[in-house]
Every structure is written in C-alpha cells, then in structure tokens.
Amino acid sequence: MAGRAAISKSASRLRNLISRRKQRSAADSTPAPLRLLATALGVYIRAAPFTAALRLVSVLVTGLAPVVVAWLTKGLLDQLTGRDGGGLSLWTSASAIAVVTAAGAVVQHVGGYADREIARRVSRFTQAEVFAAVTRLPGLAEVEDPEFQNRLRLAQQSAQNGPQLLAGSLLAIGQAGLTIAGFVVTLVAMSPLVAVLVLASAGPTLGAQLALSRRRAEVTVGTVPRARRQIFYSMLLTDNRAAKEIRLFGLGGFLRERMLTEVTAIQSAERAVDRTTLRVDAGLSTLTAVVSGVALLMTVARIHAGHGSIGDLSILIAALAAVQGGLAGIVAQLGTANQMLILFGHYVQLTRTPASAPDPTPETTPAGHPRLTTSIELRDVWFRYHQDHDWILRGVNLTIPRGQTVALVGLNGAGKSTLVKLLCRLYEPTRGEIAWDGVDIRHHDISDLRSRICAVFQDFMTYDLTAAENIAVGDLTAADDHPRLHQAAATAGATNLVDGLPHGLSTMLSRMFSGSGGSSNSNNGTVSDPGVTLSGGQWQRIAIARAVLRSDTDLLILDEPTSGLDARAEQEIHHSLRRLRTDRSTLLISHRLNTVRTADRIVVLADGVVEEQGTHEALMASGGAYAELFRLQADGYQLSATA
Ligand SMILES: Nc1ncnc2c1ncn2[C@@H]1O[C@H](COP(=O)(O)OP(=O)(O)OP(=O)(O)O)[C@@H](O)[C@H]1O
C-alpha cells in the first residue's frame, strides 16, 4: 500500500516536472516568422473584421488608380499630338482622369479612417490579451523577474500597434505591388532593359533595409531595461506617495538626473542606428537616381531616333517614378514589418505562456473546495527566492490545527512573511511540502485553495478607489452589499471611520481621481467629491475589513495586522478578531508580543527553522528566545511607566 502511494507520488512529481519543462520551453521558443505574421494578421482580422475588409477595398482602388490615370493621360497626349488615343474622345479621357483621380483620393481618406479605427480595436484587443496573460500568472516569481518585466514591456509596446503595422505593411506592399505590376508591364513593353535595370536595383536596397530593421529591433530590445528605469524615475517624480521624501530630502534633481541619464543612453543608441540608416539611405538614393537617369537617357535616345511618341515618354516617366517609388516603399515596408515581427514575438511568447502552476493531480485532489478538516502542515519546508540567494527557510516543520491560533514570532528578516506567501502559494517551496489535510497544496486547484484563505498582508494595498470598493476587493461579490461591508468595517473597528467619511462608503479614498469614472459617487465625470486621504492606522482598519469580509474561509492570516493602530484600537480589534478565530485556523504574526500571548501555540522562527514552540506560559517557563524577547518588551513598558 505504502509502496503504491510512493510510486504514485513519484509519478505525480515527474508529471509536474515534465509539465513545467514544457511550459518553460513554450515560453522560451520564439515562433517562426511566418507563424508570427499569421498570428498578427489573425489579431488584425479578429479585432476588426469589417473595417479590415473596407481597408482591403481601399488598397485595391488606391493601388490601381495611378495605372489607370497614367494610361488615360497617355491616350490624351497622343490624341493632342494627332496620334491614335485608344478609342476615347478627348473629353471622355479628361473626364475619366478627373473621376478616377477623385475616386482614388476619396477612397484614400476612407482607408485612412479605417486604419485609425482598426488601430483602436487592435489596441483594445491586444491590451486585453496582455493583461489576461499577466493576471493568469499564479505566483510572484515571474512578476519579480526582470526578464519577464522586459518582455512584458516589449509585448505591450509591440502589441499596441504591431498587428496593425504588420497588416498595414502587407497591404501597402500589395498596393504598391499592384501599381508596380501595372507599370512593369508598361516598362517591359517599352524597354525590357530599362525594366531589368530598375528591378535589379531593388535587390541591394532590400538587403540593406532588412539588415537595418534587425538592428533597430536589437536596439529596442537592448534599451528596454533603460526604458523601464526611465519610466520608474519619471513616475517616482510625479507620484504623490513619494512626494514627501522627494521634497524633504531634495531628491528632485537627483532623480531627474538619473532619468535623463537613461534618456541620453537610449537616445545615443537610437542615434547610432539613425546615422547608419542615413549613410545607407544616401547611398541607395544615389543608386536609384543613377538608374532612373540611365533609363531616361536610353528612352529619350530611342524617341529621338523616331521609335516612340511624347505619350510614350510621359508614361515612361510615370512608370519609372511609380516603379522606383513603389519598390522603395515595398522595401521600407518589409524593413518595418521585419522589425515589428521581431518585437511582436515577445507579445506572442507572453500571451501564449501557460500559467506555471502544476495541474491538480486527479488521484490526490479532493473534489470541490479543499475545506480544512484536520490541519495545515509544513513538512521540512526549504525556500529561497532565487537559486543564487541564501536560504530563507531551512527545513521548517509546523502544524496549524483546524480551529486553533498559531502565532509566529521572530526577528526582522526571519522569514515570517515569506512563510505566509508560501501558504498562499504565491511561491512554491524549493524543497519539502505544505499539506492541507494531508494533501500537498500544489495538488489543489489554486483558486479553490485561495478561496479558503483570507489575509491581512504586512504590506497591504491602498487602492485609489472608494471606501466600499477598498473593502469589497476582499470579496467582489459583496461590492453592492453595503450591510456586509458595514459589518466587515465593524469587525475591523472601522465603523466610526466609515460613518465619518463625507459620503460614507461611497467616499473616494484618494485625492488623485476624485469624482472621476469608476467611482460610484461620480456623476458623468463631474467632480462631486474631492476625496479624502486616510492615515496609516485608518488604512490598516480598511485592510482588516477587506480580509474579514471573506467570511467562509478556513485560514485567517494576520501579518502585523495592528502595527499602525493606537493601543486601545489594537486591543479592541484583537478582541473582535479573536471572536472570528473560533471557527477557523489563524496564523498571527506580530512583534508586539502582548497580542500573541493568548494564541494556542507560539512558534519562534530563527535561522530558517522553528527554534521553539509552545504556549506563552510554557515558553516563558523554558526561558528561551521568546521569554527573552517578551521580558525585553515588558521591561521597556515598565521602565516607561515608572518614568
Ligand atoms: N521578494 C523577495 N525577493 C528576494 N528576497 C526577499 C523577498 N522578500 C523577502 N526577501 C528576503 O527574505 C528574508 C525574509 O523576509 P521576510 O519578509 O519573510 O521576513 P519577516 O520575518 O517577515 O521580517 P519582518 O519582521 O521584518 O517583517 C529577508 O532577508 C528579505 O530580504
């Protein structure tokens, strides 16, 4: 029996390992250029199918119009010089030229509108995809990885207009291709040698533009870390939370300098590519001019020898301009498309990366929510944030029985908050396991698991939202249930705070977005509420209310929940939280040891392991680390009281 369980466990580990390898290789491999192009076009068409069709029609009309106009002009000129004008009267040719030119111009404007509309839709589509991919990530490891942040930035940048630029390039190439095809036939008919000369001169141009586009893409990728730092410094300079220190410590100039250093470095990399582009473009333009000069001379000589008409010369000039301009356009578009394709690969990699959490293992996962019936157990848990970092936890063994309160104490940096993050599966243990009723939590569905946990994190968030929304983020199903929100506020000792706000729960807890969209007290964007700023302790009560709003949970995590509260509020809230704790397990972390003495068990974490554990009385009697810390704090209070 035990043997079979061990085999099943090893098999499940192996499956998880293989699945993680597959996920990593899926994230690391860039799809082939053609597949990338197909994906970009897919995004373009899915985001705006009808507008894309309209754009295609505009391309066809705009591409063929110059060819038609050139032939009509040739007929007109030939008639004027007494030759055969192709069967059309002078007035018919003139009117047809006017109509085709006008139609071409109107259709071009329609194409311009379609382009902008597609840009809006593609941007919305790709932003939705990028942020869906980011929110799919179950843990914090990727979000804290600079490589991931670089890729995210490139993905955002290229997704914003990548598909549109790529599709636009293809359409422009198609349009220029139509025009060129029409005129190449003309050129070949008039002088095959000229046609070959013009077409051959496009070869070196294409090679040079593709090489330049690769370099531009390399510069964009290479400067992303600097661009991210530049954004960081500029956001810091305008952030209202950082404003106090920046002003008091006079950091404005320092941060501005740092931001400008990044800007300068990015610009000098871009300048280097621009200079190379300038040199290459100048050379290529000279080549084009020489080719058209030679072609023109050859044609003029031919007409001079009596082998052509003035109409022939006009169409040759139009054909030369159109074919050379079209070829230059195609080459430039291919360069842009190549650069965009390289960058678009980051979007595809990001949006196709599967969530890295292993799938639940069917044979060990209980059906439905993993409700806690016995205990949560940490079994020889080792953890470090990165393989090059030191171990934070070095074999922690700890049990949190159902319905009991375990207090976790230890010095700064002992790993208490890290342990909390492991319990929430924001990271996976590097070694060992955390078992929920005996089953490794990696085998539970992650959102089911998290629905059984509520937490007040030490570094909780303060959202620039209304008071109601700030509490409701703990359980969005209660967003409109004000009685429930009030109840949670009461448990967190925040009733007076909420009642004292200018608009009660509807008050905006920010002065940055007051009265604007999203807040329930806004009225068509008119400023109706200037918003309020809460104190640190008041925010802490809101964070506690947010956590206790989730009533149907098995594990309540309180990481320094009352560190910013005054002594009376702290006592009241702990009293009220104690009532909540009776029907669920609680992990309480606090440096104020008077708040943990009623816990069923106090665990001291030191050097990455559990150094001692027991009730307050037992630990005091044993005279270990806890007793020393407790006496230090108690002595401090007694000394102050005596003084
Ligand atoms: N995201 C992270 N990446 C890398 N190292 C981290 C990260 N978070 C914490 N650490 C490191 O892990 C160690 C433990 O941090 P942790 O926050 O768990 O300590 P703690 O016991 O909660 O401390 P405190 O009492 O000060 O809140 C610290 O040395 C810290 O530098």
Image: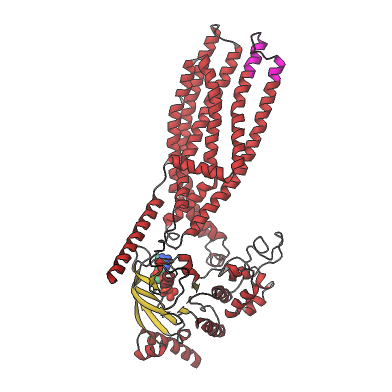
In this picture, residue 548 sits left or right of residue 376:
right
Give 280 or 215, whichever is nearer the viewer.
Answer: 215
Q: Nearer the viewer, residue 179 or 526?
A: 179
Q: Which of the colour schemes (rainbow, by chain, secondary structure, one colour) is used?
A: secondary structure
Residue 152 or residue 37, whichever sits in front: 37
- Please give the range of residues in magenta: 72-94
Q: Compared with residue 368, is residue 402 higher up or lower down, i.e. above or below?
A: below
- The secondary structure that most of the magenta stretch takes on is helix
Asked whether residue 226 is in view, the answer is: no
The number of numbered discs placed on residues in the rendered structure image is 0
The reply to whether residue 59 is visible in this rendering is yes
List the single residue furthest toward the bottom: 642
Q: Quadrant of the N terminus?
A: bottom left
Give the percent coordinates (x, y) of residue 468: 63, 70
At x 42%, y 36%, the residue is 211
The residue at 50%/23% (across/down) is 289
User: Which residue occupies the extreme front position in the image?
Assistant: 1
Image height of 206 relative to 123, above or below:
above
For residue 171, side relative to residue 284 (left or right): right
Up/down of 396 relative to 642, above or below: above
Residue 373 in percent (x, y) is at 44, 77
Q: Quadrant of ligand 1?
A: bottom left
Q: Residue 585 location, x and y as percent? A: 46, 79
Residue 349 rendering spot, x and y as whole percentages: 44, 50
Image position of 628 with respect to 517: above or below: below
Whether 291 is among the magenta residues is no
